[in-house]
Amino acid sequence: MNLFDIFKSFPDQDTCLSYLEQVRWNGKPICPYCGSDHSYQLDNENRHRHHCNNCRKSYRVTVGTIFHRTHLPLQKWFMAITLILNAKKGISSRQLARDLNIHSESAWRMGHQIRKAMKQHPDLLTGIVEMDETYVGGKPRPGKGKSKRGRGTKKVPVIGMVERN
């Protein structure tokens, strides 16, 4: 996914919150404080805010995630995730700040939160991991013109990762 897809898929905060609710709760809100599913949605102004009947706390879908207590729009968070994942050799917090038009301290925190979330499944590949990419597809047919090489090709990209030992 690229930045254009992020803008198209998540044009505003409401769309981002709806997406997070669908991914995290699948239509049935669960209180992050007590784990109860006995809650109700608050009024129309706070459409994405819920109130738990057991512990009597109100919450949003962002509680307990890397987006909790942020003042930045979720669209910028989604763009930051895309930039970090798409950067082949990583991205600095200053470059992230320039790309998202935010302070460098905010970009530094975002980068750390995103990397921390990426480390939540350390048992997948551990130690030294080797990674390579290639493009799979046959040679172009005669008369179809010259084909591009590398990232400009119409071939299918394939990425392989292996753990040493």
Image (spheres, rainbow, N blue to C red):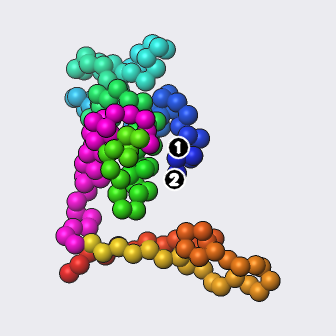
Within 10 angstroms of label 1, few (less than 14), some, or many (20 or more) residues?
A: some
Looking at the picture, how far across and down is residue 161, in whole percent? 35, 73
For the point 31% across and 38% down, which residue is it? Answer: 104
Quadrant where the image shows the C terminus: bottom left
Q: Check contact, mark 2 vs mark 1: CB within 8 A.
A: yes
Q: Secondary structure at mark 2?
A: loop
Residue 60 in view in this figure: yes
Q: Which mark is residue 6?
A: 1
Looking at the picture, how far across and down is residue 123, in whole percent? 22, 63
Amino acid residing under circle 2: Met
Amino acid residing under circle 1: Ile
Residue under label 2, please give it. 1
Q: Is 54 or 148 nearer to us in this picture?
A: 148
Within 10 angstroms of label 2, few (less than 14), some, or many (20 or more) residues?
A: few
Name which of mark 2 and mark 1 comes first in the sequence: 2
Real-space Cα separation, disc 2 to disc 1, in angstroms: 7 Å
Q: Name which quarter of the figure residue 46 lies in.
A: top left
Task: Locate residue 31 relative to residue 42 in the image: left or right.
Answer: left
The image shows residue 111, relative to residue 105, as above or below, that is below
Magenta region, residue range: 99-128
Q: Is 12 or 103 nearer to us in this picture?
A: 103
Q: Is 131 or 52 nearer to us in this picture?
A: 131
